[in-house]
Image (spheres, rainbow, N blue to C red):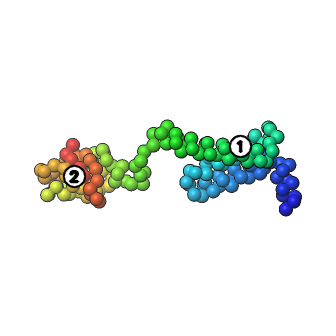
Amino acid sequence: MVQVLTMAANHPFWVWAALAAALLGSEALTGSGWLLWPATCAAIMAVLTMVFPLDPLQAMGLFAAMTIASTYLGRRFIPQLAGHDDRDINDAAARLIGHHGKTVGVFAGRAGRVFIDGKEWAATSDDELDLPAGTAVEVLGLEGAHLKVKAA
């Protein structure tokens, strides 16, 4: 154990690099986004310990301060800069809002089926009139498992 502590004290670069790799590996497994900031800060600390002779307590304090600041700033500002979209990318129906398609058959009683982006969907018409087959429609939203459409 003494040899490990001696190696860590004499070569802090490798300790910080190993911590950065472990945090980055954990982030890759979880995909949470929370471990990216500490992993980056550990990598920065690895470089800083090569350039500046930092006491271990100073290095840990600097790492903690950088991690807190980068996590706060990253979580606060990065989504706004990236044009954060609250829609679920896995929700195929929600992504169809605004898309155009055609009715598959006659809409009777405001209910029928539409063909949009290569798929057939159950739909409810926003119009009071029955829509004939082949009518161009636009998706307005969702009503349960049905797309809400209007004649385009």
Q: Amino acid at mark 1?
A: Leu
State the residue position of label 1.
62
Q: Amino acid at mark 2?
A: Thr
| Residue 94 x/y as whole percent | 34, 51
State the residue position of label 2.
103
Residue 47 placement, left or right of 121:
right
Q: Are marks 2 and 1 in contact (CB under 8 Å)?
A: no
| Residue 60 x/y as whole percent | 73, 48
Disc number for residue 84: none
Quadrant position of the C terminus in the picture? top left
Q: Residue at x 22, y 52 (%)?
A: 103
Q: Residue at x 71, y 43 (%)?
A: 62
Return the residue nearer the eye: 147 or 43.
43
Sooner in the amino-acid sequence: mark 2 or mark 1? 1
| Residue 113 x/y as whole percent | 23, 57
Q: Which residue in the rendered view is the most extreme toward the bottom?
A: 1
